[in-house]
Image (cartoon, helix red, strand yellow):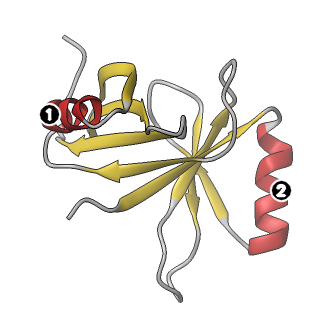
Amino acid sequence: MPRVSWFDIPADDLERAQKFYKDVFDWKFDKWDGPMEYYMADTGKEEPGINGGLAKRMPGQMGITNTITVPSVDEFTKKIADNGGQLITQKMPIPGIGWFAQCSDTEGNIFGIIEMDKEAKTT
């Protein structure tokens, strides 16, 4: 069964946001060595939960976005559309990680889906 596996926090000020989450929750941040400025958030190992990331807010982006791991982005974008949801961004590679798409549910809530594939890359 697909589960939420990651979260993304949009921030206007990356340093201020990192300081907030570090001071409040003791989360640790490491800069991702990828094609965009992105910080991996380590939320700890003592309690059940997931890790996530922090990036510059994109125009119109509101709130935290959860990402759900699925076996096939193509299959699930079809299921989402067939059930009244919408595809917001087309399937795209996250090099060395997998295939990602952003969608919305029937209530307008935005979420991501990811198909893990270390061979994913821009063609």
Please tell me which residue is depicted at 22% across the width and 42% down the height of the picture.
115
* Residue beneath disc 2: 19
Counting from the top left corner in percent of width and height, residue 75 is at 13, 35
**Vertical side of 40 occupied by 120: above or below:** above
Please tell me which residue is depicted at 54% across the width and 40% down the height of the picture.
109
Horizontal arrangement in the rendering, residue 62 relative to residue 46 (left or right): right
Comparing 21 with 69, the one in front is 69
Comparing 57 with 40, the one in front is 57
Horizontal arrangement in the rendering, residue 119 relative to residue 47 (left or right): left
In the rendered image, the quadrant that contains the N terminus is bottom left
**Vertical side of 109 occupied by 45: above or below:** below
| SS category of the residue bearing label 1 | loop
Q: Give the amino acid at mark 1.
A: Glu
Counting from the top left corner in percent of width and height, residue 103 is at 41, 32
Counting from the top left corner in percent of width and height, residue 37 is at 59, 30
Counting from the top left corner in percent of width and height, residue 16 is at 86, 46
Question: Disc 2 and disc 1: Cα gap in Å?
Answer: 34 Å
Q: Quadrant of residue 44?
A: bottom right
* Residue beneath disc 1: 119
Q: Give the amino acid at mark 2.
A: Lys
